[in-house]
Amino acid sequence: MQSVTAINCEVSAPVLRVVFGGFLTWLFLHRRSVRGDYATATFLLAHFSLFLATYLGNNDLFASIKSTLTLTIAYISSLVLCTLAYRFSPFHPLASYPGPRLWWVSSLWLTYVSYKGKRHLVLDDLHRIHGPFVRIAPNTLSINTLSANSIYSAQAHMEKSESYTAPGQIKAVSLFFKQKTEKLHNDRKKLWSAAFTGAAEIWSSEGELMKSDDPLRLVEGGKLATVLLDSVGQTPWLMDIIWHLPVGRSMVRLRDVAATMMRNRIKSNDNIQLRDLASFLLSSNPETGERIPHSDLEIEAVVAMQGGSDNTSTTMALAFYFMLANPTYYAMLQEELDNAFPDRAGDLDPTKLSLLPFLNAILQEALRLGSPFFLPRIVPAEGATIEGKYIPGGTIVALAAYSQQTSPENYWPDPLNFHPQRWLPGGLGPGSRTERTALFSFSSGPHICVAKAFAYQEMRLVVARLVLNYAIKFAKGFDIEAYREGILNMRTTILKRPLLVKATRRSTANLA
C-alpha cells in the first residue's frame, strides 16, 4: 500500500506542476499575441525534451511515453480550461455581448465559416437572432448598423486587425498589410495614390490586359493565397503554421514570382517608355527623399498583382451574370451605349463612360450584391462607443457589410435581388430607398482602396466594349441558380462554376 501511495505521489507531483505551468502559460498569453510557428516549435521541443529526460532516467521506453503523454495532456487541459473559464466568465470584456457560445471558444469557428465562403450569410443569420452586436470570436464583434461604418474613418483611429499580417511574418512595409504605425501606412499610400492620379492620362487608354494569357497561373495562385489570408488569417497563430506547410505553397509561390518580376522590373527601369505602377513606386518620397526598400517593393508587387486582377474581374463576371439573368437590363445597357458610341469599334472616352447612368447603375448593383467583404479593425486602447454601446480597447470589430448592403432599411424594395434602376434618379418608385453610404465595396477612410477610380474605369471600359460589340446570352442548359449558389465570398470571390455564355458579334447578329 505504501508503494502504491509513493507511486501516486511521484505521478501527481509532476502533474500538479504542469497543471500550474498551464495556468502560468495562460497568464502569459492573456492579451498577448505570439507567433504560432514559434509557439508550436517551443511546445514540441519542450515535450520532446521531457520525454528524453524521462527515458534517460528510467531507460523504459513505454513508461517514458506514457509519462510524457500524461503530463502533456495535463498541461494542455490546464491551459484550455483556464482559457475557456475566462472567455465564458463575466470578467471577460465582451461578456455582455450575445452570440453563439461555441464561437466564444476559439476563432477557429470564424476561420471555418470564412473558408466555406458563406460567412456573410452566416453572420446575417446571427444578426437576425442576436441583434446588431454579435460576438463571433473570443475577442471579435460583428456590428450590423449603418453608423458602424465610422470604424473605418480617420477619426476612429482603428488599425487593421492581425488578420492583415503579411504571411510568414515578413518584415516589410506594404500598403495592404498591417503596419506598426499609421504613419508607415500613410507614407506608402501617398506613393500609390500618385500612381493612380498622375498616371491617369496614360492609363485612360485601353490597355492590353493579359496579352500572353496567364501561363504561370498567377491570378489563380493569388486567389488561393487570398482565400487562406482571409480565412486562416482570422486565427493568426494558425496562419503562422500554415505558411510552412504544403497548403501554404500558393502564398509562397506567389511571393517568389512577384519578387522575381519586381527585381527584373527594377533592372530595366531606365528603358521603360510608358510609366507604370512600378515607375511611381520606384520614385523617391517627395517629402523625405527616401525610396522604398527593394524588399518592400517585392511585397508591393504581390499586392499590385492580386489587387489589380481579382475583384474587378469577378465584379464584371457578376455584372454579366445578373444582366443575362434579366435580359431586359442587358438590352437597356446596350441601347444606352449605342446612343453614346455609334462607332462600336472606336475609342471609348473614359469621361463619357463615367457619365452613363445605367452603366454605372449596373456596376453599383453588382458590387452591392457581389462584395460582402469582412474588414476587421482593432479598437484603440481608450475604447469606442457605437450606438451607445461601449466597446473595450483591443477588441476586433467588423461591419456586417452584406447585411447592410441587403438591408431593407437601406435598399427597398426587393433588397436581395438585382435591380440597377434603384441607383437612378427616382429609384424603384415612390417609397423606394437607396442608401449610397451603405455600399462598402472599396472600404472607406484611411484604408480606402487607392485604385477605386481606376477600378471603376476598368470595369466600365470592359463591360462597355463587350456589350457594344456582342449579343450575349446564357449558353444552352446553363443553370442560373446553381451558378449563384456557387459564388463563394472571402476577401476574394470564388466562382465555383464557369459563366457559360453564347456571344455573337453584333455585325452578324439579329438585333431586331
Image (cartoon, rainbow, N blue to C red):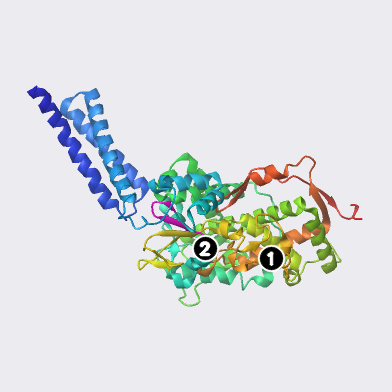
When asked about the image quadrant of residue 2, the answer is: top left
Decide which of 41, 71 is in the foreground and name it.
71
Specify the quadrant that holds the N terminus.
top left
Residue under the image location 22 percent in, 44 percent down: 21
Q: Describe the element under mark 1 as helix, strand or loop.
A: loop
The answer, for residue 90, to whether it is visible in the render is yes
Which residue is painted at 41% across and 56% down in the image? Answer: 97
- Does residue 275 show up? no
Magenta stretch encompasses residue 140: yes
Q: Secondary structure at mark 2?
A: loop
**Alpha carbon separation for disc pair 2 and 1:** 19 Å
Residue extent of the magenta highlight? 135-145
Q: Is residue 485 above or below residue 393?
A: above
Q: Residue furthest front?
A: 431
Q: Looking at the image, is mark 2 or mark 1 nearer the viewer? A: 1
Residue 360 vertical placement versus 45 (above, below): below
Residue 432, disc: 1
Residue drawn where x is 63% and y is 71% of the image = 199
Q: Amino acid at mark 1?
A: Ser
**In the rendered image, which residue does mark 2 sit on?**
145
Q: Residues within 10 Å of mark 2 (few under 14, many from 20)?
A: some
